Image (cartoon, grey):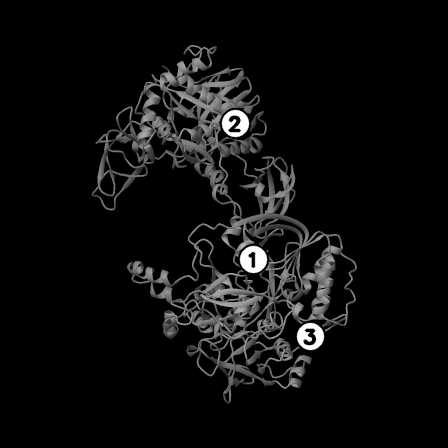
Amino acid sequence: MFIIKCPFCGERDQSEFSSGGEAHIIRPKKPTELSDVEWAKYLFMRKNIKGVQFERWNHSHGCRKWFNMVRDTSNDIIHAVYKMSEKPPIK
Amino acid sequence: MPENLRVKASNFIDETTKISFKFNGKTYYGFKGDTLASALISNNIHLVGRSFKYHRPRGIMTAGSEEPNAIVQLGSDKALTEPNVRATEVEIYEGLEATSQNCWPSVNFDISGINNILSPFLPAGFYYKTFMWPASFWEKYEYFIRKSAGLGKSPTEPDPDIYDHKYIHCDVLIIGAGISGIIAAKIAAKNNLKTLLLEEKNELGGLTIYQDSDFFKIQNKKSSDWLKNEINEIKKLSNLEIKTRTSVAAFHSYNYLLARENLTDHLNKEEKKNKVRQRLLKIRAKNVIIATGSIERPLVFNNNDRPGIMLSSAVKKYADYYGVVCGKKTVFFTNNDSAYESAISLNKKGLSVEAIIDIREKSDSELVKEVEKIGIQIYWSHTVVDARGYKRLKEIIIMPLSKDGMSVIEKKINLKCDCLAIAGGWTPAVHLFTQSGGKLKFREEDQVFLPNVSQSKQISIGSCNGDFKLNEIIKNLIINVKNFLEIKNTEYDNLKIECPSDNVKKNIWLLPSNKVIGKTKPFVDFQNDATAKDIKLALREGFRSIEHVKRYTTTGMGTDQGKLGNMHALGIVADTAGVKMGELGTTTFRPPYTPLTFGTIVGRNVGEFFDIFRKTPMHEWHEKNNAKFENVGQWKRAWYYPINNESMDEAVQRESKAARESAGILDASTLGKIDIQGTDVLEFLNRVYTNAWSKLGIGKCRYGLMLNEDGMVYDDGVTTRLDENHYIMTTTTGGAANVMGKLEDFLQTEWPELDVFLTSITDHFATVSVCGPNSRKILNKIIPDLDLSDKNFPHMSFKDAHIDKIKCRVMRISFTGEQSYEINIQANYGKSVWEKCMEAGKEFNITPYGTEAMHLLRAEKGFIIAGQDTDGTMTPIDLQMDWIVSKKKYDFIGKRSLYRSDTIREDRKQLVGLLTDDPNEVLEEGAQIVAETNKKPVEMLGHVTSSYFSPNLNKSIALAVVISGKKLKGQKMFVPMKNKTISVTIADSVFLDKENKRLNA
């Protein structure tokens, strides 16, 4: 079980958080102008990387804020945590 | 009469306190401090169980948690009995009862012992191979397989014991209180670090505490005496917590560990009373020091499982620690010097050591010289080829080894003995290290896997890190602990240590035999009866991955998880397949290290505490009025209120009828309520609901349907505009938290520009829903100053009001299709308002109705329940709710998905009404619907989602989803049931009051 540093509350136990899948997928501004294939790409296609992955997390049993996390899925090392509006601190 | 084999007083056994216990029905005696195993051996009992597959007689092999054979059933009480307990770990107490497992009728005569003779027909994978064909016979085989499978017996009644969970945070956690752990603990604690030291046994000091030998000295004292003094000192340290009888079960990432603290298992029944039995410690440690030591390896030769064949370290422990002799004639069989240490120890106690058989050509360590001086015969370069004695070892047969160690040569020698102490070297206990994600490396020289790279803040010290000699252990651990904890100096920096010099090592995983392998039984996994022969067979049959070999042969899959034999399995695979062990890798070590009870895992979360449940403010009233409850999410909702001996069906019919004919009252407090405020709320609602919200006036309510981005119905509910920038949204009872989470997600991540704030207020308000033709009259009695006329207060509108000066919100909304008012009031007034309504409604026979009647009433009206009539695959179009999907809005969640190629298919399942030809026939929810009964295979077109007998229409009604259902109105369909086929007709899904006259009445 990880310890996650919520950008608003600080270090907390993983049980206070819930994961929200891949980060930096922007909802299309004009969905109606997309083809089925383009829309499906937004809707369904998610990476499932063994290695460094950008993820969305929610401090659901805390401040309820969403934030982003860079986590290595092969060893669960969290490389960075940053707010929703911010750019990833590492590439 | 059983003999007493207690030899000499030991400091660890209290010989003044005699304890009686029962084993297989007979009463025996031991002393305080004994384990069940040591007490049994002192009574000359070695045969304690039968093996899993061949039912071979098995004895005690070890003196610790690695024991594969001596597993027993404790107690006979239906609730308290416990299977698969290691006799080597059970501390005896007055009244202890234990029985052998896996044998019938008794351990001495076990009918299934025939399996031993049949064993040529029971090779690895026997069950896989034999019962594959014909497949239809499986049902016949299953009974017999199930009967012979499994070890002990589970308790059949609920566990009355108390278990507990506890969180611990510490700077340093040290696992294992052997000499390494104790030194590390003292260093850490003396440097102001909050330290926790855990030991699985009841006594601190590991193997060193009973070493008692002039060959091992620290600061000119015997190592054991020196350590005793250290233990006394650490017990005085204030920031060191020591927990004995505490076994670490799991080591997760981020230094999160689970340990089981055993609090009362060593106490008698009277002492146990009202105490917590076991506690699960949830430990978060800044630094972890693993000092779990190592486990002695057995040697693999023909019939190496005879009762009386034990690990050399165990024989030593029984003699030195428990003062118990394991045999009258002991022979050692070894590949290293540790057997010599044991032999010297036994000799010092005056116990007979017949001989030492050593596979090495020679060793000239001090220990060997001492043994030679004593005059014990050493057979260098010999191996044991057979062990005889079915229920107790009688003799062994040894032969000289060839130069390369691959075969045996020359003549056999028979040696009489009743105890063979085997010493195959040591395996570092790296289980916890690997559980935490650490990677191992292989050391060729003595064939061990050692901790290599770890990602968390931890180190391994002592023999679990591959240091086996006392001087190396202490020297290395001090350097490592200092580095790890960033400490400059310790009191141990210049310790004077004496111990025997390095010894010659030789390792042969599978010892050669004078017989072909097929004719031998060299056990590798004692508990699961896997032999070297089975492993070789698996390789011959093409298995290469060690994980596959493990599963095929079941090696290492017993309750001991192969703590003894896994290395041998790897070694035999490597030797046979011609690969290097380091390249082969190990199987995965998984938690728990030793089995945990379910009680420990669940702790206090049993019975009513299993899951929290939520009660509405009116819960007490429902209870008093005989309500039956149903679980909706975590809520307890009143389901129906039977009067006298009414059945559920009768109660629901009565309640439903009353609600339509006069007045009904429902506790709707559980509906999710979200307070929404901000200047952009209408825009927000436009984006999250399918319909248009721009024109929602103050004081008005609107029903909305919420979709997932994939276009499927997610939730529904009514949102009310309370004020210019203030709204209240209701959600389904079960969906409240999810809807809240989803809306927050969109607000925070996709639409941060919107000025909208959400607050969950579900628990803040109680909701009383009064419906039926007389509902207005009742409301009028309670809130006389509120104008309830249709003109002032039409359907789908809202008013602020007061009941006895208490502010409340009244909505005229309906889920039943009747005229209906919902009173929302601060939660703590909920019960009193409910009672007021009951009082005011008395003259109209106001009837409380539960969720079942509510479901029936809404089904009559054709209202859906998200989650009952929808299942995450229904679009609003599938539900025939096209009217609620705005065509004008540019976008809302899920809009684009409504015209994906899949969602516009006409042959999707669509929601329809169903009427049975026989109006009294009520369909079963979930029943399948077909068009043709004779077609094979039967083509299932859909299923029933809601079904009731409507008391108001006096006929059976149902909702169903059917492929292309929209087009099939009026068509005949069939619902085949087990005993009959029911004819139905597809109908409109609104059965009652299509014109909404009742709503607006």
Q: Secondary structure at mark 3?
A: loop
Q: Nearer the viewer, residue B876 or B383?
A: B383
Categorize mark 2 by other alpha carbons within 10 Å: few (<14), some (14-19), many (20+): many
Q: Amino acid at mark 2?
A: Ile
Subunit that carries the residue with mark 1: B
Q: Residues within 10 Å of mark 1 (few under 14, many from 20)?
A: some
The residue labelled by disc 3 is B213
Three-letter residue code for mark 3: Ser
Answer whether labels 2 and 3 touch (C-beta < 8 Å).
no
Instruction: Return the residue at label 1.
Output: B267
Mark in front: 1 vs 2: 1
Percent position (x, y) of residue B957?
Answer: 28, 29
The residues tagged by marks 1 and 3 sit, at their Cα atoms, a distance apart of 33 Å
Give the SS element for disc 2.
strand
Mark toward the start of the polypeptide (1 vs 3): 3
Q: Which residue is mark 2?
A: B674
* Residue at the far bottom in the pictured view: B410
Q: Amino acid at mark 1?
A: Leu
Decide: is B976 above or below B582.
Answer: above
Q: Chain under label 3?
A: B
Residue A1 appears in the figure: no
Q: Position of residue B177 (x, y in %)?
A: 65, 61
Secondary structure found at label 1 = loop
Vertical side of B718 occupied by B777: above or below: above
Q: Which numbered disc, 1 or 3, marks the residue closer to the eye?
A: 1
Foreground disc of the pair 2, 3: 3
Q: State if disc 3 and disc 1 touch (CB < 8 Å).
A: no
**Could you tell me residue B458's position as x and y percent?**
66, 56
**Left or right position of B823 against B929:** right
